Amino acid sequence: MVPGVREKLNALSENLKVHVITSDTFGMAKKELEGVNCIIHVLEGKGHVLQKENYVLSLGADSVVALGNGNNDAKMLKAAKSRHLRMSEKKEPRSKPLRLPKYSSGRRSMQSSCS
């Protein structure tokens, strides 16, 4: 795992449910995610593109923010993206951003604000 990602995911999990949906190509996902407060869903069989999209839809796409780094993420991202299009059309006021952990002297402190 890239340094700092574990801490950022845990910071996000203080305000959101974090789901990791993975094909786990190298069989390392569960080990890599040890210590991360998340729900891990390892895809099986074929059709991972549709499985990811259906997972987002089963959570309720209107309440999902999705991130992806692979070709098989496109439909999942599109399903979650529809929420953002509707929100921008309503011209709702922006909420304050979530500030991720800052580190000093090896101790973790977090400032966050969400509305």
Image: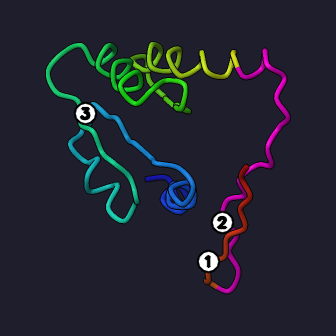
Residue 22 located left or right of residue 89: left
Residue at which label 2 appears: 101
Residue at which label 1 appears: 108
Identify the amino acid type marked 3. Thr
Sooner in the amino-acid sequence: mark 1 or mark 2: 2
In percent of the image, x 38 and y 41: which residue is there? 20
Label drawn at residue 25: 3
Between the C-alphas of marks 2 and 3, the distance is 30 Å
Label 2: state its secondary structure: loop
Range shown magenta: 87-105
Q: Nearer the viewer, residue 88 or 31?
A: 88
> Mark 1 touching mark 2, by CB under 8 A?
yes
Residue 10's place in the image compared with 66, above or below, is below
Label 3: state its secondary structure: loop
User: How many neighbours does mark 3 have within 10 angstroms: few (below 14), some (14-19), or many (20 or more)?
Assistant: few
In percent of the image, x 53 and y 14: which residue is there? 78
In percent of the image, x 40 and y 59: which residue is there? 37
Image coords of residue 3 (percent x, y): 52, 59
Residue 56 located left or right of residue 108: left
The residue most toward the bottom is 105
Residue 55 located left or right of residue 16: left
* Rendering quarter of residue 33: bottom left
